[in-house]
Amino acid sequence: MVKRTESATSAHRMAGCTLGGLALFAVFAALLGFGLERSWVAEAFADPVDAMRAQDEAVYANSALRMASHGGWMTPKFMGRYVMNRPPLLVWISAVSLKLCGFSRFALRLPVLLAAAAATLLLFFWAQEAHSLWNGVACALLLIADPTWHTYSRIANTDMLLDMSIIAALLIFLRDPALSRTRSMLIFAAVLATGIMAKNVAGLLPLATVAVFHLLTRRRPAFSLWKAAVLGVLLAAPWHLYQLLAHGRWFWTDYVKIQLLGFGFHPPGTSVEGPLRFYGKRLLLTDPVLCLLVLLALPPVVRAALRRKEEAALLLGWMLVATASLVTFHYRNLPYMMQLIPPLALAATGYGSLSHGRRPQAMAAALAAIYCAKVVFTGPAWALTYGRPAPPLPAAEALQYYSGLSRSNELIAVNTDDEFSATVLPLPSIRYCFIDTRGVVLRYAPHYGYLGITVRAAQFNEIEKLLPEFRRRLRAWGLNSTEPVATTIVADSAAEVAGLVAAHPRTDFYLPGELRSAVEPVSQASHRLVPLATGRFFLLARDSSRATGKLARLE
């Protein structure tokens, strides 16, 4: 009778914990996701310090829309070309969400929001188990109020998926450092594979963190850890092996030569600031409160780690590995800082003078007040926008207006300000033209020039003659389609753009205002000029008919 009572009590306690966890998950999802669909694709500021938009979201959105509408699940495409710089986990789950929930920005971003809510919940549990309930509350509030965490919870991007996998792997390891339970070993392997499929080799960061942990604690890694690492790699291997066999040249060039070696060590263009200055400045400007709390907590974390305290050693190892990855990877990009935010938040709320006694309650109350202040203000880099970017993406309204005209003509966007978001509109054809005197566009992906994906303006003017050769090259690389040919055009000057307009009287153009004097004289007979409030203008071909686009409309 006593055993039955104890069993029932245990079951009730477990059910209560599960319901409590689900309730917290819903709260975190609501706080992070309110107004999720407000901003247009790629409109959010990926880097509010430099006012850089989340351009990558347009690439993932276009790929997910294509996948949901036309299939091709093994190999994502963007504007008709293969996209293999990263594995397709984000595109897969976004495409599934679009098919299940309808073609909307909410459905596109929903998987990342759920991953963010799960990551926040895991960090709450981490801080609660290691310290106290109020430390957990403070940690969750610090994350929800962090602008970088807030932004990357709300856009279709791989960084939150990577963070969730790293957090889950390290929490499992903290609970069972030897991975002695089969369940722990299998979950560790599964989330390791998830990280790899989200962002290639960055998914291996938990293994590097665990290695530093063992150095700090002077312990020998358990054999189960090796088994979990091998199993995780094996789980992620099938897609990589398929691409090596099916599209070997494209996969090797995109995945290894461009993404890992090119952007990793010789990026085509990046900040002149050193990595510590670049990321340190952005961390300070976007979240000064986190920086202050980390400064107070870092000495106690180091002391505890040197005394071989498990949680402190794991956090210090995590911070060291995340910082080393930012320094090693030469391309500067604020989203990469996402790897550092979770250990900083855990250290800030778990260590230092504010983490003991009743002080975590006061810290949680102060962080709640700071969160409210960040919601009220919209201008500074430390504010939370909730889908109200200031200023909004200038091109969004103009290009949606153009899409509503349902014209059959192809559109060439010159020196675009749309961050490639036009690729998610139901347009018959969209090309991008850049006036690039320094050759940055061609250096970005040299094989695009060879394959005809990126062409010079003179080549585009005689594209029909060049198309058979580009078709042959694309087929040799495993793509039996000419759809991506000349989707990017490089011009040397305004005069070359004027030449494009003159040579293509049935093509529509979206141009910056400073090119008006160059193109207006050659376009009067063939095009109608439509000025826009943003200072840009359309040249709409007089010869046109009504048509529908290739993609479903993203509401």
Image (tube, grey):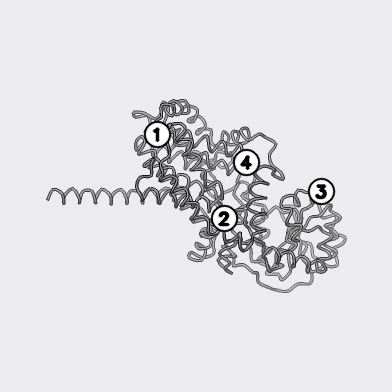
Gap between marks 3 and 1 measured at Cα: 55 Å
Given the image, on which type of amino acid does mark 4 rest?
Phe
On the rendered structure, is 435 left or right of 346? Answer: right
Given the image, on which type of amino acid does mark 1 rest?
Glu
Q: Which residue is mark 1?
A: 310
How many callouts does the rendering have?
A: 4
Given the image, on which type of amino acid does mark 3 rest?
Thr
User: x, y percentage for residue 328?
Assistant: 61, 38
Given the image, on which type of amino acid does mark 2 rest?
Pro
Of circles 3 and 1, the one toward us is 1
Instruction: Report if the CB atoms under discs 2 and 1 are less than 8 Å apart.
Output: no
Q: Residue at x 81, y 57 (%)?
A: 456
Q: Secondary structure at mark 2?
A: loop
Of labels 4 and 1, earlier in sequence is 1
Of labels 2 and 3, earlier in sequence is 2
Q: Which residue is mark 2?
A: 87
Instruction: Tell me if residue 83 comes above or below residue 146 in the rendering.
Output: below
> Residue 378, located in which quarter of the rendered image?
top right
Q: Which residue is mark 3?
A: 437
